Amino acid sequence: MQRKSPYQESASQNIMAVILQSLPQESGLTKIEYEGPRIALYSKNPSYLMQNSQLVSNMVNTIKKRIVIRTDESIRKPQDESAKIISENIPKEAGVAGTLFDAVLGEAVVFAKKPWMLAQVGEDFDNIELAEKTGWKVRIRKAPQNMGLIEALYRTLGEAVGERTKFYREVGDKIFRDKLSESAEASLMTLGGFAEVGRSCMLLTTSESKVLLDCGLNIYAKDSLAAMPRFDAAGIGMEEIDAVVLSHAHMDHTGFLPALFKYGYSGPVYCTEPTLLLMSMLQRDYVRRSGNAALYSEKDIDSAVIHTITLTHGIVTDISPDVKLVLSNSGHILGSTSVHLHIGNGDHNLVYTGDMKFGRTLALENASWNFPRVETMIIESTYGGKEDIMCPREEAEARLASAISKTVSAGGHVLLPVPVIGISQEILLVLDRFMKGVQARVLVEKSISEATAVYEAYPEFLSKEVRQRVLESETSQFGSQFSIVESESLKNGSSEPAVILAPSSMLIGGPSVGYLKQIAGDPHNRLIMLSYQAVDTPGRIIQDGARQVTIKGEMINLQCQVERIDGFGSHSDYNQAMEYVKRLRPKLRRVLVNHGERQKAQNLASSINKFFKIQTQHPLVQEAIKLL
Amino acid sequence: MQRKSPYQESASQNIMAVILQSLPQESGLTKIEYEGPRIALYSKNPSYLMQNSQLVSNMVNTIKKRIVIRTDESIRKPQDESAKIISENIPKEAGVAGTLFDAVLGEAVVFAKKPWMLAQVGEDFDNIELAEKTGWKVRIRKAPQNMGLIEALYRTLGEAVGERTKFYREVGDKIFRDKLSESAEASLMTLGGFAEVGRSCMLLTTSESKVLLDCGLNIYAKDSLAAMPRFDAAGIGMEEIDAVVLSHAHMDHTGFLPALFKYGYSGPVYCTEPTLLLMSMLQRDYVRRSGNAALYSEKDIDSAVIHTITLTHGIVTDISPDVKLVLSNSGHILGSTSVHLHIGNGDHNLVYTGDMKFGRTLALENASWNFPRVETMIIESTYGGKEDIMCPREEAEARLASAISKTVSAGGHVLLPVPVIGISQEILLVLDRFMKGVQARVLVEKSISEATAVYEAYPEFLSKEVRQRVLESETSQFGSQFSIVESESLKNGSSEPAVILAPSSMLIGGPSVGYLKQIAGDPHNRLIMLSYQAVDTPGRIIQDGARQVTIKGEMINLQCQVERIDGFGSHSDYNQAMEYVKRLRPKLRRVLVNHGERQKAQNLASSINKFFKIQTQHPLVQEAIKLL
């Protein structure tokens, strides 16, 4: 603890005083420090605090800040020794795939095939006994089929221990500083993703802070002015931003984030843990594919990783002196969230839905809607057009099954161009059941399978039903019998018909284009479009009826069958979006519609206004709206 | 001329080449230089170019830039010698009040009581014969009753010859640089004066430039956050701005301008010459009255003066690589203008009405409305409420005459709290006729009389009728028989009843408050409110019916008569504003309503939308709107 001076009394010192007064000697407290938006209590006897959780709850209620218990560094045994202790004390049957250490948080994370054997399955999956033996805080997680992405994450984190330690302190200092202004003000500037899809980004400016919501890159854009969020037009320096909040991992919401760090941002990024893993996977893939044209390098992606503070659903987190954040499930992809910002002293509540599915899928629960207060809501409108009413899920599954059966029984191949994350995993769950009775190989491109591993590692973000199955089963629920491939040649393989899942979903490049070239010429084969197709992409052109399309300079004639099945969409359709607003209606004062082509945004806005009599706007990019 | 390099070919060099090719030897051309947004041709034989105006017109048509003829410095005789030559060559009867020199422009301005004796009354009032004799460009102007303000202006300009010369060149370099961007974009950010009155300010951001429209200060505001334009919230550094355009002189449109210079702005300010004179008068008055609380000093006002480039009505002026400006009469006060901005290559036309009177007054012509193109119009709504329908002008004059007659014949005084500029001069014109038959002194506060001198010096900005009278008459048309006073005690003077014109118009301070205290106690006296009263000002409180009001801590009980006569307003009333929009309607795509209390802006916006089916918004401060 720093020495106290009457001339330096600060908010943080008041907090420290409250904590010290509430804790008995046995707590073994050694220091109290900011850990980003949390207060970390370091202890030589951490199990006391972990077991007396009521004590910590009381403190949280008093100081209104989130508290985490950390083990004092002096009691932590070396990592290799700790790993040994852990493996010796864990039954073989638990199927431990590995233990990863984070020296900054003092956490050892044990990945096990049967996690329920090692810990009460709860939010923290703590194992107090192992913590006492190693001096590390031991968390138990489900081991996915493939540990690659997670190991890479811990490697990046492990290489920046000093930087991260300093960063956590500094972020806390900024969040918990005294307020500079007495007035409560807020306005929102649209930087991308308004009346368009592809580079979601907006800046919330309050009396005390600038918070960026999403930071997307439109990889389909024709020029850089249309590809990047309009920081240039807004005249905002990256270093002026205080915090970034990401709704989910897709590139159109996170693809510009590393550029932010490249050009001077060094503050925190808030998102869920799956979002962190999945976005850096997509960003690295973008850098590799783009070569010299990439807007940033892997180093910048590492910077983003190092500065990310992951949050779970439903926890109120201070992210600046006048903004509190709560993330909640938005039902779009694993780890996707709606963002609830509480501005000022209860002065204004803003909910940004992010990409949102108000409708159940196999993989995910319905989007949360029960916000305690909302004055302004920003809602997405990907499928906001009057025509965007999707077929029921059961019908979509039946159509998919029938199309596959018909094609493979005639000896044809089925190509499903899908995004790496989202619909892919949903379709894998569907095919896992369905393909058991079908004579065909299922080929899954490797990048999809890597993303699926993250779905398996974070069962707490899955639907209740799939979560249970993932936790209890040693084999994958996402098609353990399917083949993982890399841009396979269909001729070289078995002659057996294949069902192929491959990105890109919009046929702008990647393996799906290679497969398309192989199947396009034969009328026995079938191309099935399942996901959203952005304007001007080859996928959209085909979906709109063209049977000749030019991809990367090469003309492809489609003699194969082409079908669109829309019921698997990971966005709400028109009816679902309206249903969602209806639920929230009593709380809403204003709705802003974003993330949709101009006509779709306009249609959803005018419907909301007409049916629910709520003030509704559909702003363009480069606009600012006063909220408070 | 600079030496030419094939590696430095620039837009400016092309212009220079065109000019050189078009001019014969006799033109005596010595150099071609930028003079802000104009191209100045320096010549040893300037009368050749002045007489062969067709030659210059042709050049203007070719290069699409404004050209001015300047005399070469080598032929200019010293100022005192030139002054002597001028006075010897001018007939005594012309009544020359003085000659003022501007060494940067090489202009000698002769102020004469009978200017028509010395020059064709036209836009330039040039006297070529005197130019040949002195080597200076000699302009003839009307001499006002009081030369004080004009002499002070030339003094300030004369003290900054080096700085201004450099400034003019640099401004030209910036305006005529090559474009940096191929896209044409524009958005407007509201910094003040939206859904409120008092600190009009907005920022137009285009692909190439940032142009500030007005820069007002709300001197009635309760705190500084409400007083100043919200540059803080917009995060715009003063040095980032490329140009400032001012619609007219009132403090709520110009009061923050010197602060801009204080905090780093050093670019050009565009407005009419009367606006320059009148605003610096008001700003200096504000600094004197505010003492230590002033936001800036006289030095900063001088900076603003030095950086101002004055324009006349109807001339197209480049103010940045992608913005052209035309000012036109807005009928509000002397020199007040509507601002027409032509953005990009004909991509968007924005008209900002400024404060605007679409209705004739004695002093000024009706606001111009015949813009060749307008996509977006920003219209003021001071009197935009349904209730804001003013009595006809004839009725207002009759009511004023009757109120004055009744009061003075009963031995009472009449107090007219009026703004220094605007309604004051209008009322002076009215009283000039009317008071000839009335037995009462008219007391005019000195500051009003100083502003009136500017009205007399710029007859080209007056209504046709008054212009003619001012030019032809040696005595003032604004009440030559009235007494100019400074906060007079009514008891010390003659016992004759008085009609008093004194600022402030809203009784927030200044002489009008002193007079009010003197007349308030006697029911024979009368207070007449003629102008707009801002929310929360003592004037508004009285207008709303209170007969007890606290001004600067002192409570005043009003036993005198109180009357409001609204037909002299220098803003359009509701009907006039609607009539103005109706005229422009075929050209308009969008209307933004500003400069009105929230309800008034809202009412005018909804009326325009309802009656004319034009997309209409009434933004708040701190919003941004995409125009293009």
Image (cartoon, coloured by chain):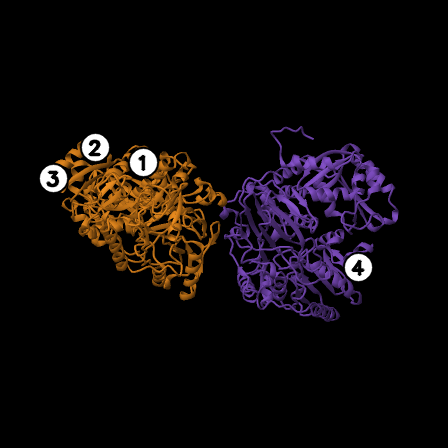
Chain colours: A purple, B orange
> Is residue B595 placed above or below B104 in the rendered structure?
below
How many angstroms separate mark 4 from mark 1 (CA)?
Answer: 81 Å
How many angstroms separate mark 4 from mark 2 (CA)?
Answer: 99 Å
Per the image, label 3 sits on a secondary structure element best described as: helix
Q: Return the residue at label 4.
A: A481
Packing grade of label 1 (10 A; few <14, some 14-19, many >=20) is some
Q: Which disc is residue B92 wearing?
A: 3
Q: Return the residue at label 1.
A: B165
Packing grade of label 4 (10 A; few <14, some 14-19, many >=20) is some
Label 1 in the same subunit as label 2: yes
Per the image, label 4 sits on a secondary structure element best described as: loop
Per the image, label 1 sits on a secondary structure element best described as: helix
* Chain letter of the residue beneath label 4 in the structure image: A
Packing grade of label 3 (10 A; few <14, some 14-19, many >=20) is few
Q: How many marks?
A: 4
* Chain letter of the residue beneath label 3 in the structure image: B
Marks 4, 2: nearer the viewer? 2
- The mark that comes first in sequence, 1 or 3, is 3
Amino acid type, label 3: Lys
Amino acid type, label 1: Thr
Q: Are marks 2 and 3 in contact (CB under 8 Å)?
A: no
Is A121 on the left or on the right of A488, as rendered?
A: right
Amino acid type, label 2: Gln
Q: Are marks 1 and 3 in contact (CB under 8 Å)?
A: no
Q: Are marks 1 and 2 in contact (CB under 8 Å)?
A: no
- The mark that comes first in sequence, 2 or 3, is 2
